[in-house]
Structure formats: C-alpha cells, structure tokens
Amino acid sequence: MALELPLSLDDQAGLPLHRQLYARIRLAILEGRLAAGSRLPSTRALAASLRLSRNTVATAYDQLLAEGYITARSGSGTYVCETPPEELLHIGARTAGVPAAPLVPAAPPLSAWAHRALAGRIHESPYRSDQTLPYDFRDGRPAVDHFPTDLWRRLITRRLRSPDLTQFGYGPSSGYPPLRELVTDYLRRARAVRCVPEQVLIVNGSQQALDLLARVCLDLGDSVVVEDPGYLGARRAFAAQGARLLSAPVDSAGLMVDELDLAAHGPDPRLIYVTPSHQYPTGAVMSLPRRLALLRWARAHGSLVLEDDYDSEFRYTGRPVEALQGLDHGDIVVYIGTFSKVLFPSLRMGYLVLPPALVEAVSTAKWLSDRYTATLEQQVLADFFAEGHFDRHLRAMRQVYQIRHDTFLEALRRELGDLILPPQGGAGLHALITLREPVCMDALVEDAAAVGVGIYPAHPYYLCPPDRSSLVMGFTGLSETAIEEGLRRLGGVLRKAARTVDHGLKAGVGTA
Amino acid sequence: MALELPLSLDDQAGLPLHRQLYARIRLAILEGRLAAGSRLPSTRALAASLRLSRNTVATAYDQLLAEGYITARSGSGTYVCETPPEELLHIGARTAGVPAAPLVPAAPPLSAWAHRALAGRIHESPYRSDQTLPYDFRDGRPAVDHFPTDLWRRLITRRLRSPDLTQFGYGPSSGYPPLRELVTDYLRRARAVRCVPEQVLIVNGSQQALDLLARVCLDLGDSVVVEDPGYLGARRAFAAQGARLLSAPVDSAGLMVDELDLAAHGPDPRLIYVTPSHQYPTGAVMSLPRRLALLRWARAHGSLVLEDDYDSEFRYTGRPVEALQGLDHGDIVVYIGTFSKVLFPSLRMGYLVLPPALVEAVSTAKWLSDRYTATLEQQVLADFFAEGHFDRHLRAMRQVYQIRHDTFLEALRRELGDLILPPQGGAGLHALITLREPVCMDALVEDAAAVGVGIYPAHPYYLCPPDRSSLVMGFTGLSETAIEEGLRRLGGVLRKAARTVDHGLKAGVGTA
C-alpha cells in the first residue's frame, strides 16, 4: 500500500514538513487518488518511504484525523473517511491551489445594479490606456514631483512614534474629528462654504462622495440633471443607481439654467450635478446670475444640488471663485471636495459638506460601504493642515501651475495657434482645446502617441455630439520643457492631419 | 454714502486686506444691507474712511465686478447689481460662514436604500459606546501595542524616499498588482485557498467586500442565508440592499446545513453568508461533513457562498482549519479576508477572492465606489509580506494571543467557573461566554462599567432570541494582568447580580 505523493516534500518551502505532508495527503483524498475507505500506510512505513521522522507523519495524520479526512480503527489502522464519493470526485476535478485548465465559466446572476454598472463602462473614454508617454497631456494629474514627501514622511513618523494607540483601532465613520474641524475652517475662509464640522464627512476621494449620494438620494428611475459635456465618474455613479440622466447644455457661463425646464419635462429631478467653479471639461465659470437662478430653480423643484469643486483651488487670472454652497441657506447644496488635486490622488481622501438633514443617512451609508477612512492618513492630513503646510503647499503649487499654465497657453499659441480656437484657460489643471477643422480623432491619437504625445479627445464627455473636435489637455503633470516639446510635436502631427484632410484622403471624416 | 462694514478689517487674519474687504462687501450685498442698485462710495472715499490704500479698495471692487456683484457705470460710479431682490433677501437670512440659528430642517427625500440602511442601525448592538474602560472586553481588537510600528515606519519611509512617483497617481481599481500576487501566495499556502492573482481584489476592509458583493449580487427581495447568531455588519449590508434574510441556526459544528431546506422554502437564496473557520460569535468550527454538505446544497440551489474568514489566522489548539473555498471548484465560494485582525483595523485593508465570473462586475463596483484603495498602504503592505515580516508578525501574535487566550480561560474558570457554562475557546480574538443563570443584561453591563469592566451581551447578534444570557468577550486587546483583574471584577459583579436575582428582587427578569 504505497502512498503516491504527487511531489516530493521540500524543506525549503517555509512550511513544516508535517504540514506539507498533511496537505499532500488531503489533496490526494480530495482528488480521489486515495479512495474513500482505502487504508493508509502505517506512520512507520510512510516515514521510512519518505525519509521523514515518524513524528512528522504522526502529526500530519493527527491533523487529518481532527479534520475528518481520515479515521482510525482500533487495532486495524488508518482509513480514508467514507465521505460521499460523488462529492469527492466533484471536488477532485481541479488541483488545489493551482487552477490549471480554464475555470468552469459559471456565471452567477448579477443584480440589476451590476448590469447597469457594467453597461456604464462602455461609455468610459476609450482613450484612457495604461500607456506611459513622455508628453502625456492627460488631465487631472497634479505635479506629484513637487509634493513635500520629506515633510509628509516626518509627519507620518511622528504619528507612528506617538504612544497614542487609538490610531490603530476603529474610528468614527464620519471621519477623524480634528480633521473635520480643520476642513471646516479651510472651507469657510478659502471657499466661503457655510458649514459646521458636524456637516463635514471624510470620504475616500470624490468618487465615494458621488457614490454615497447616489445611494442615499436616488431610487430606480429618478431623474438627475448632469452637465453636457460633463464628468463621467458622476454620470456612471448615477446611471448605475438606475437614474435617468437629463443633460443640460453648458456655455461660457456654465450650466444653462434656462434649459432646465426643457430638459426636465417629467418629474422633478432629484439631483442636479454641477461643477460651477471650473466646469468639467469646458473650464467655464458659472456666473453669479446663473448661480442664483440655479438655486432658485432647485428650490422650486425640490432638487438637491451637488457642487463638485474638484480643482477650484487653482485660478491663475482673477480671484478664486467662491463656492455655490455659500450662496445657499445650507440645505439644498451638497459640497464635494477632494485632496487628489492639491495633494495627490493615491491619498484617496475627499470630503462632503452635507445639509444637516442628510448627515445621518450619508454617515450610515459610509459605515455600510467601508466603515471609515484609514486613520493614520487622516491624522497626518490634519497635522499638515494644522501646522500651515496645506496653505503653504497650495501657494507653492499655485506658482508652479501658474507657470505651467502660462507656458502651456503660450506654446499653444506658438505651435497650434492657427489650428485651434483661442483657448479658455485661467484655472484648474486642464483646458479644453477646440480644433478649427475636423480631424479623424482615432488617427490623431495614434499619430500623437507615435511621437510620444498623449492626447485625450473630449467627445466621450458629451451626451449630445459636439460641433467641433476638441481635446481635454492637462498641463500640470508635465514640466515646462515637456509642455513645450509636447505641443511642438502635437503641432506637427496636427498639421499633417490637416493636410491629409485637405487633400481629401480622409474626406467626410468628422468628429470621431 | 457711508458703507457700514459689520466688522473692522483685521490684518492678523492671514487673508490680504483686499480679500477681507471684498468678502465684507459681498456679504453686505447678499444680506441686503447694500441694496440692489445702490451706489458704492468711490475707491478714494472708502480707502480714506477705512485707512486702506486706494489700491486695496480697487482690487476688492475689481473682484466684485468680475463676479457680477457690482457694476460700473461710465462716469457715474459703481452700483450694486440689480439681481432679483427676493433672491438676495432669501439668501440674506443667514450670515455667510457662520451658521448661527438652527438650520432650516428641510428633509430631502431619501432613497429606499437609505431608509433600509437607517432602519438597520436600530439592530446594531446598543452596547457599543465610545466609553473607554480599563478592562474592556470588546471583541475584534488586536493587540495593537505589539504592532511593529518602527518597522512599518521604516517601510513607509523607504517607499516615500523612492524616486518612483507612480505611487502618488491613480492606481488600478483591483489593487496594487504585487500585493495581489503576495496575497495569492499567502492564501494558497496558509489557507489552502485556490486562486490566481486575477481573482484577488484589494478592498478597504471586509465591510467593503460585503457591500460590493451585496450590490453586485442582490436585487430587492432576493434571499440571503445568514447564520443565527451572526455578524451584524454583513446582515446590515444585505438588508440595506433590500434582501430577505433567512436565518439558519448554528451549533457546535457551525451552520446547520440540514436546516437550510426549512429556512429557504421560497425562491433559492442568492447568497449564503458563513464564517466557517470561527463562527461569529459562537466560535464554532464548521466540520468537514457540514462543509461538503453546504457546498452541495449551494450548488444544487445556485447560491453563492460568502466565506468570511475574519480571524482564522489564530488557532490555539490543533492546526489551523483550512478555507471552505479550497474545497470548491473555485466558482461558488467567494472568500473574504481582512488585515484588521492580523495587522490593525485602521489600516482599512482587506481582500476578496472571487470566482472568475464575478471579477469584472466587482472591480467595476469598486471603481464606482471609490476608484481604488490608497496606494502607499498597499505598497507598504506588499513589502511587509515580501520581506517575511507578515509571517514573522503573525507568529509573534500567535504567541501573544496564545498566552492571553490561556490566561483568559484560566481566569474565567477561577473567577467565574461556577457562574458560566464551560467556554469554547481555542481560536480567534474572542469567545462566547454563556451564563448559567439569567441576569438583567442592561444592569449587568452598567454594574460592570461602574467597576471599569466593558462587557458586550451577545443577544443583539441573535435573530431568534437565545435560551441563555451570553457575552461576546474579546481577550486579545488586554494584557494578561488586565484580563485577570477584569475577570476578577466581573466575577464580583456577576455574583452580586446572581444574589439579587436569587433574592427575588429582580424575579422574572430573564434574557434582556
């Protein structure tokens, strides 16, 4: 009765030998190589055949006995248990720990939410690949090379050296209380947001804010007004929740509030999602009359306004525009902010300022989603605020981005001036660049990538197809040299594309 | 035409004077103290009256002009804009930045999900307060004072010193790829989980795993089997999603699979939630025949099994029990693990091992929920694994907890032996302690707290009221001395309570 072990035991494997032996025998039972009821060799015989100590074998057998794989019959030896054989055969179809052949393509039924969530992916920009290009004008990328990592490291170190162990345990789902206070102070003085700390909730970036609000506010079939063009992460969260998206057009003064009556001819929309400080992606600033009209409209229709203030900290001409939330009583605007742009995206930290009536529901949703946001990061961020580093870093980044913004606009004029409409810059981390002539976008993206330039067409952000081809171009993640060289190369590519269109080779190819 | 400013400008305030002036005038306009159409003083007059430079006033006016609050009429001066006055009055009801009087209690309609989520809170244990007691036997609290913070700090420091800046940017929603590989290796060798890295998804703790699965798998009215007693965080996530909870009883061999036919008399349950390695809160280990029967039942009914392996790393008698997932083909069991117990809760890190057919839907749900988990923590955890610290820490904690476990059981016998049933220890971070005689639980909790002892009744975890009073007692978060002293004090309190009941003063008070 030789026990065939599939592999020799390996004393380099880090696992004790008795444990390896146990696992091999267990596998042999599960795969049916050791049939139910069959007799195992004695510990002495197996130890001899495998050159193991008898104790090792006995320990492995004990474990198998304890777990019910084998059974010991007094005076007669050790046997594989009589577990239902079809179950063992069933299980034996695959090898433990090493999924070899393709897995059985079982498809558990998905919820309606999951189907909608998956359907949303096809509306994602197809241009966001994982490619690394030296002149990548992807938007929303802060200059992480200017982040004060040494300082951040010192703050982490200090917190980790503190004898206060509460930072390792469970924390409140609304966030670390001192951070909520510091964010409140900041929003009051820098963004004219009207709030008390009880209204502020710390979340894992603005996507979580959008998702929590979608869950707390939207039932299947509810309407949500979104800007057209607009931010896809918001649209996808609302659509997955089963909302009907009503698109409202955007002009140079932001969301066209007069169009809301046309857009919302059915039941009143539950939510109106806006980016008033720096419309995504057009860059428009919502004018004061529009802001007041929007609040009036929302109040009249019982809609909640979600103000996504994703990059308003950066304004290069004029003064910062203040938050829409500050114009309200504090009960119909939810303010959403993020640290992804001022600090760095992978911190995964953002915040919500909620009308008091929503605080309990949204904190409960946060608890159910992931209980609370990691504490150490919240504490370090609180220290970063409390010791003035946040304001200092923001000032420093404004200078860095101001230079990049000016360099970008200047190089655009120089290299592409005749090919594009005069761009509207002045704020944020990106600008919308509109081409004078239609081009084949897919070809342009490909040709640009071939010379190391990453560009991102704007049409995926439109619900109504736009009149002209345009690009969303980030200018904060590249050095000035890279901005200039990238735009020089893009100019060459665009000029070639324009010539090709002129020569009729791609006639009829308009907005992709 | 004097402009009454509500407060004097303060050059200590950190804001430039022109900005303070701007804010004061804006507020005066919004509150109606400066009426629409009224004329502002000239920059010269205002500068003189406020003792500011004329330039400061001009800058403030420029900003107000740019934002549409005031308008300049050529040759005639500067006027407050003619914005609809009722809107301004409306807005003026409160002071910007300082929410004074109670906020208008507007109640925006909540979604059905939010109503269910809020209703779930009343099922939460009422005994979980924020009190800090010296002898707190709250469960699920690892000995964070034994966490190697110096090492962790060094790993963070090394990562923050690395010139690789990708850690600051956006990351993949399924997790940091090297960490997914290391978790795969660990689960294969330590837990006999069958998986490849593509099946592993990094999430913010096990609550996010439960929530993502609830969203992806459950529609309104779908059935979910839960253990009774069982974990509230799971139950609440399913209930919020609108699931019908079917409770299946638990005995000393875990979920009673034979009872499933009785419990699930309607449509087949979509999910079966189990804690087979260490049932929460009873501590039962699911036997192999039960495991096989559960998989057979789930397969026959098309149910997905969620295996929550929340503290299986710790077993003090016998060998670790392997994962239920390893007995399956890899297509009907979802394995959920967490680092909250082995490392620390506020790391907010856990993982899912998904059947291949669910990977895309759950990653999409993760993207919509919060895009991805913070990168630095994932990288540091990957280093902690790759350099053998994880295994070393786990071994060290097993020794620490073994001693605390043994001390706890020994002190229980000594101090409370006659008052309780023989406890089932042997694993995890807590044990269920059943009292021989009924007591008034609320009074017991209060009396224990009065002598510094935190205890947590188990009845909130039961759907069917239990026969006897019991406590869920964590023994890992306290030192041996604290365990002994805490139990000595608890013995005193319980003895007094028992005498009180004997004397008939609280006759008729059974399980609270």
Image (spheres, coloured by chain):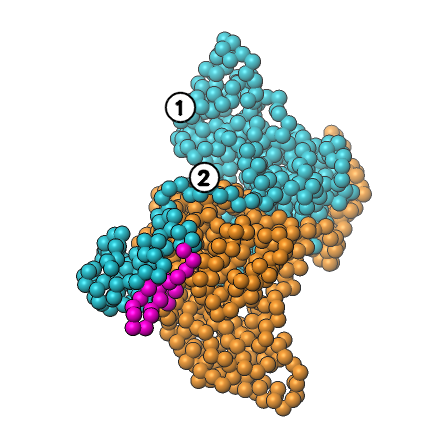
Chain colours: A orange, B cyan
* Chain ID of residue with mark 1: B
The C terminus of chain A appears in which quarter of the rendering?
bottom right
Query: Label 2's element?
Result: loop
Q: Which of B215 and A244 is in front in this view?
A: A244
Q: In which chain is the residue bearing label 2? A: B
Q: Quick check: can you spot residue B166?
A: no
The amino acid marked with disc number 1 is Val
Counting from the top left corner in percent of width and height, residue B233 is at 57, 39
Query: What's the distance in space between the residues labelled 2 and 1, CA to CA?
Result: 23 Å
> Relative to the observer, which residue lies in front, A319 or B339?
A319
* Left or right side of B385 for A266: right
Left or right: B302 as drawn, with respect to B354: right
Residue of label 2: B143
* Nearer to me, B124 or A104: B124
Residue furthest to the bottom: A503
Residue A101, image x and y in percent?
Answer: 74, 58
Q: For mark 2, does the 10 Å Cα neighbourhood hold few (<14), some (14 to 19), or many (20 or more) residues? A: many
* Residue A321 screen position, x and y as percent: 39, 63
Residue A208 or B175: which is nearer the viewer? A208
Q: Which residue is drawn at 72% across and 50% down?
A: A109
Precedes in sequence: disc 2 or disc 1? 2
Q: Is residue A274 positioned above or below B292 on the image?
A: below
Q: What stretch is highlighted in magenta?
A: B66-85
**Amino acid under label 2?**
Ala
Kindly identify the residue that appears in the image at 57 percent across and 51 percent down. A270
